Image (cartoon, rainbow, N blue to C red):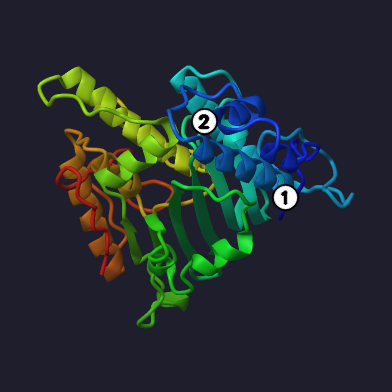
């Protein structure tokens, strides 16, 4: 739900008169983070867009309040998203060695409709805009999620996608226009048109009589990311990222970890903390209060890692076990691996995942 922001006392018309270009952006949103050289018009339009959008909606960096813009009390459902975003973004700011708030102030919530089941979301839908601290551009991120346990089955689906805007207009964002761009079909169709890119989606398939007492966790899902897309995301947010020579292993690893961090920022912008393993000493850590994988296999972490060109030693084996678990689940068996006691989703404990060839989207259709 829209709300006023900390910038609501700023007159957007000032953006069109006194300062222009990067000076205008630096005045209202500085210090910028190593801003790139761009035309005066590009930085002016970016500034007007950001000022007016922040006035119309609300930024994550606004002070906590017990009341909304209409004077009504604010409940846990109303603050879950903003609190989750702050918590996730702080982690990334610390990893990058940035001053606290550098990235938080770049996040504007255009729409939020969250329904909690005790402390965890039963359903949530959000549209969030990430204004780059470096370039006169922004990325819109849309997330829709539902998970509810019934007597004999679990309803679960989600879809996460993004759209890069390289030439912001000098007008405020419009949530209705964004909604009209999104697909109205299933999770796999939600971010397939009008410049939107799918990051990942998943659901439990209840077709072919899979419901009631015979219900099984038949998982469908896919990571739609690819390396070019990961580069686009990073460079939109933080400027040009030069790819090092393949012979420089240390520089290449830093390059690929940077790509992973850029994708993690998209997830963080909608309150999802997903720590993607980049070395064999690390593990994939999925969000605590939302489920992006329906079984034990951490295929979202694997797909992100794959798109950024990283492959871990155990990835192939983890993928094989994940495939086996899905086959067993589809047959109606509670599959456990030889070296596991099982986890909260039923099945083996799978902290890491695998991927396919470098730079290719990982097909995760489980039929």
In the image, residue 178 sits, relative to residue 44, either above or below, namely: below
Q: Position of residue 68 (x, y in %)?
A: 82, 48
Residue 197 position within the rendered picture, expressed as x and y whole percent measured from the top left: 38, 56
Report which quarter residue 240 is drawn in.
Answer: top left
Q: x and y percent of residue 241 in the render?
A: 31, 29
For the N terminus, the image quarter is: bottom right
Residue projecting furthest to the right: 71
Q: Residue at image x 50%, y 50%?
A: 141
Residue at coordinates 31% horizontally, 46% vertically from top-left? 229
- Disc 1 designates what residue? 56
Count residues near mark 2 (Cα–Cα under 10 Å), then give few for <14, some for 14-19, many for 20+.
many
Report the residue marked by disc 2. 133
Q: Is 209 situated above or below 79?
A: below
How far across and how far down the image is residue 129, in percent?
A: 56, 46
Residue 285 can be seen, yes or no: no
Could you tell me which residue is drawn at 62 percent across and 30 percent down? 24
Please state which of residues 249 and 277 is positioned toward the viewer in this rendering. Answer: 249
Q: CA distance from mark 1 to mark 2?
A: 20 Å
């Amino acid at each position: 739900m829209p709300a006023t922001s900390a910038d609501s006392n700023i007159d957007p018309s000032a953006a069109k008169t006194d300062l222009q270009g990067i000076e205008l952006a630096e005045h209202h949103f500085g210090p910028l983070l190593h801003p790139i050289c761009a035309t005066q018009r590009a930085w002016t339009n970016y500034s007007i867009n950001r000022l007016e959008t922040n006035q119309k909606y609300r930024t994550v960096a606004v002070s906590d309040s017990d009341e909304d813009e209409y004077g009504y009390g604010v409940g846990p459902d109303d603050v879950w998203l903003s609190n989750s975003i702050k918590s996730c973004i702080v982690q990334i700011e610390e990893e990058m060695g940035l001053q606290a708030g550098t990235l938080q102030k770049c996040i504007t919530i255009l729409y939020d409709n969250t329904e909690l089941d005790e402390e965890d979301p039963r359903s949530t839908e959000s549209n969030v805009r990430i204004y780059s601290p470096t370039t006169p551009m922004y990325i819109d991120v849309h997330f829709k999620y539902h998970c509810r346990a019934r007597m004999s089955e679990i309803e679960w689906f989600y879809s996460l996608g993004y759209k890069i805007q390289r030439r912001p207009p000098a007008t405020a964002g419009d949530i209705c226009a964004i909604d009209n761009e999104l697909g109205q079909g299933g999770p796999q169709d939600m971010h397939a048109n009008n410049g939107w890119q799918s990051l990942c989606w998943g659901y439990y398939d209840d077709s072919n009589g899979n419901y009631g007492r015979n219900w099984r966790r038949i998982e469908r899902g896919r990571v739609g990311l690819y390396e070019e897309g990961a580069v686009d995301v990073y460079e939109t947010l933080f400027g040009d990222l030069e790819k090092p020579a393949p012979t420089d292993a240390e520089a290449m690893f830093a390059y690929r970890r940077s790509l992973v961090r850029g994708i993690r920022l998209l997830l963080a912008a909608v309150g999802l903390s997903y720590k993607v393993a980049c070395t064999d000493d690390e593990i994939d850590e999925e969000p605590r209060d939302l489920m992006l994988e329906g079984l034990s296999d951490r295929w979202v972490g694997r797909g992100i890692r794959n798109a950024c060109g990283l492959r871990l030693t155990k990835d192939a084996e983890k993928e094989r076990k994940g495939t086996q678990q899905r086959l067993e689940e589809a047959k109606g068996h509670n599959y456990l691996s030889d070296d596991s006691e099982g986890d909260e989703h039923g099945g083996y404990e799978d902290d890491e995942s695998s991927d396919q060839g470098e730079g290719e989207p990982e097909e995760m259709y489980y039929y």
